[in-house]
Amino acid sequence: MSISPRGNWSSRFGFVLAAAGSAIGLGNIWRFPYTAGENGGGAWVLLYLAFVFVIGFPVLLAELAIGRATQQSPVSAIKQLVPGTWWPIVGGIGVMAGFGILSFYSVIAGITVGYVGLSLVGKFNATIDGDSSAAIFTGLTSNGVLMISLSLLFLLLTALVVRKGISGGIERAARVLMPVFFLFLVLLVVRAMTLGTAAEGLAFLFAPDFSSLTVGGAVSALGQALFSLSLGMGAMITYGSYLSKDDAIPISAGSVAIFDTSIALLGGLIVFPTLFYAGAEATAGPGLVFIVMASIFGSLPFGSVVSVLFYLLLAIAALTSTISLLEVIVSYFVDDRRWPRERAVWFVTALCFVLAVPSALSLGAFGGLTNFYERGGFLDFANEIFGTYFLTVGAMSLCIFVGWKWGIKPALASIEAGGHRLPAAGVWSFLVRFVCPLAVLVLLVYGAIFGANW
Ligand code: TRP
């Protein structure tokens, strides 16, 4: 039942599922393994985990606090808290980050749908090896028309859910999709852990070798912690704005953070044993999950079933995340510009589609976009700019806003509304006021002065 005309989650469990659905996505099973692979594994993973607890979780609480206190999406929320200031720009940057992330995210999500199709027609059969798997990947990604169509298809699926609103669209989709996701995930972890290369995979993920860490690696670990929890651009402000006054934020936020982080690690437990089994390189970049995973299905018992499950899993995880990205931008037009939801959904979807085109053509279809800068193509570029820099700067600004402008007291009151105490509230305040802003600043300044490989 709706409490406000904007809509609400129908229950706390519905909120946790939707927020976990937003957090758990390609970030966990595509971005986490390939970034861990590029940065040497264990030590980077440890740093990522540290950032989740020291920066991610405090920022998650801060975003939910803003959302629930104002019942508004980021721009209008900040306007309401500090009228007549420049601070709402922080929300505006979040809306831009949303466009940027959704535009490349929907391209990778489109590839997952393409791979569901390829596995259904039995492409990943007994004859497949590393080379032919790579050829299948490039075959798909260098087909510009197909890539654009798959991204469009995914954006349309997302739009169909978001136009239905909060409890009837987003929450209902999460209730169906998340349990299916968990089931598939467990099946795949069991399969990967019985491959015989489980020990190597575990060692890569958990045995730290600190000599492989760089400043650039540390920035990307922080970016990954924020990206994975959907933080730094106001998605959790928006989801928090549909919470009612007595939902328990400390418990819900804790469950979301634990869920999301465990699933990234489980994603690693699927991908790395498989990678060593296939004898592939961990540094393959964004194609890693697609190429490596596809190369072994043929040699597995029930491989064709497993392959369909795996890519469906990815597609489902991606959908509950694209929903949240689209919702942030749509709710800006609804709350701040007073547009009807339906118009906002179609306008934003169309604009995102236009922005997705360069990313869709940058995995081989069009040379200039494929070799866009020294570290890769346009998609990698968008991923780095929006997925790392916008989010780290966004998280820093939100912490400064909550810690120094709006105030710890009203934020804490919002977190604890309904009588749900936040344990160690003093630690949270210290992290938000000092640790998070300084950590981001130091990392970005060091990176700028000494270069990312320092
Ligand atoms: N967290 C999602 C993932 O891990 C991606 C995502 C959804 C996101 N909404 C977001 C990232 C908002 C940053 C901000 O795949």
Image: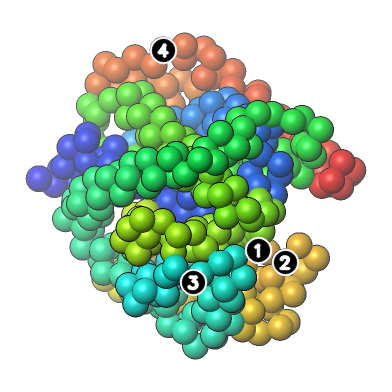
Which quarter shows the C terminus? top right
Dots 3, 4 in contact, CB < 8 A? no
Horizontally, is 213 left or right of 37 in the view?
A: right
Residue placed under numbered mark 3 in the picture: 127
* Amino acid of disc 1: Asp
Horizontally, is 430 left or right of 25 in the view?
A: right
Q: CA distance from mark 4 to mark 1?
A: 39 Å
Residue placed under numbered mark 2 in the picture: 376
Q: CA distance from mark 3 to mark 4?
A: 56 Å
Q: CA distance from mark 3 to mark 1?
A: 31 Å
Residue placed under numbered mark 4 in the picture: 423
Residue at the (36%, 74%) spot, across then down: 122
Dots 1, 2 in contact, CB < 8 A? yes
Q: CA distance from mark 2 to mark 4?
A: 44 Å
Task: Determine crowd level at label 1: few under 14, some 14-19, many 20+ residues with C-alpha closer than 10 A.
Answer: many
Local secondary structure at mark 2: loop
Q: Position of residue 378 (x, y in %)?
A: 66, 71
Residue placed under numbered mark 1 in the picture: 380
Q: Position of residue 166 (x, y in %)?
A: 23, 53
Residue at the (71%, 41%) spot, across then down: 40
Q: Nearer the viewer, mark 2 or mark 4?
A: 2
Q: Position of residue 323 (x, y in %)?
A: 35, 58
Local secondary structure at mark 1: helix
Q: Quadrant of residue 202?
A: top right
